[in-house]
Amino acid sequence: MKLLILIVALLLSLGVLAQSTALDGFIGTYAKEHHFNGSILIEQHGDIRYAKSFGLANIPFEVPNTQHTRYKIASITKLFTSVLILQLHEQGKLDLGKPIRTYLPDYAGEAGNKVSIQQLLNHTSGLPSFDGISDQATAIRDGIPVYQMPHTSDQLLTKYSSGPLISVPGKVFNYNNADYVVLGKIIEHLYGEPYEQVLKEKILRPLKMNDSGLLHQGDIINSLADTYFYRDDRKVLSNDLPAYPENWYAAGAMYSTTNDLMKFSNALFGLKLIKQATLDLLIKPGLDDYGYGLWSYDTTLKGKKHPVVKRPGAIMGAQSQFFHVLDQDITIIILGNTGATDSDAFVAEIAKRAVD
């Protein structure tokens, strides 16, 4: 009997080893063929299954990316903002069904009495997007005005996130940063502190996410990867267009590492940040399969349906993926610093090979 158990255990371990080797081989080949620059970390049940970095953090000086490299994580920031809002909800300080002006009395836009906190979280507010740039050629020719002039968070709210509604609240999914600017200001108003300080106190410090924070144009951040976008007109990588990264604010201004984001993932799904009932709210899919700050849907992996959540991010050369297979407790973190690789396709292919 003992011999039989030993044989079964050995066969299982060999199967896991073979799967790990196949995953390693696939990622290495895919990264090379698709010119991936960045870092990847995969965990299952708290155990590291894969950790490797590719390419350069700084191309001119040939500085390699490592697992300690810090990256701009773009809209993964929205997931942190959602958690901060839901923590306020758990504390009884915020009702998701109440309108904006309940918590921002001076909010001037027509959305103030019409749009609920929930509709901001799931991008059904009807607020217009303020980015204003629809294609790369226009950005190269005309710049990105909202992000290339300095703005305070108050200015972002009043100038760009308080306009007339373009759809009936709750009826249309419209992904935009304005929703999360408003949420960031609500967080500030209820805590009486800047968003950045609340982020540190409620998430980053408790989780010892020491390599994460908010980007500022005036700050030099050690070990932060430079970002390069792929120019369609010249078919080459180029330096990102100049910008004030803090203007992405609570919608996209964070930097982090693969290790820090894994700490966040383990805390979120391990119920260290919010309760199970609140997590259920976060991942409940609404219009466009969007929950609160992430997409939530079923996908087919190895012939079986699996529930997954996904939070991508992309700002020029900054490309990021936060992907979690709920029923397998697998988290895939991809952080990149060039726009040469389709990170959505990459994470989908990894997920297909990562599940049991």
Image (cartoon, rainbow, N blue to C red):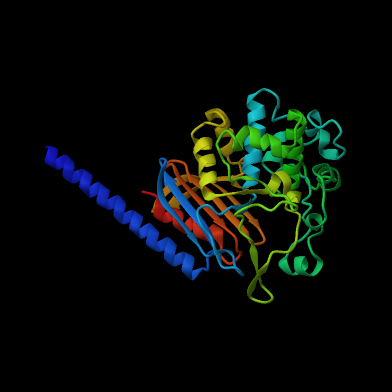
Q: Position of residue 85 (x, y in %)?
A: 67, 33
Q: Quarter-wise, where is residue 56 in the image?
A: bottom right
The reply, left or right, for residue 62 in relation to residue 246 is left
Q: Is residue 117 left or right of residue 10?
A: right
Q: Position of residue 339 (x, y in %)?
A: 61, 64
Task: Tell me residue 309's x, y (percent).
Answer: 53, 45
Q: Residue furthest top?
A: 92
Q: Position of residue 283 (x, y in %)?
A: 56, 39
Q: Residue at x 75, y 43 (%)?
A: 181
Q: Residue at x 26, y 48 (%)?
A: 13
Q: Is residue 218 visible?
A: yes
Depth check: 190 or 194 in front? 194
Foreground: 337 or 1?
337
Residue 88 found in image quarter: top right
Instruction: State the residue at coordinates (55%, 37%).
Output: 208
Q: Is residue 17 above or below residue 264?
A: below
How many marks can you see? Answer: 0
For the N terminus, the quadrant is: top left
Q: Quadrant of residue 320?
A: bottom right
**Nearer to me, 28 or 282:** 28
In the image shown, does 321 or 198 lie closer to the viewer? 198
Q: Is residue 198 above or below residue 164?
A: above
Q: Does the image show residue 173? A: no
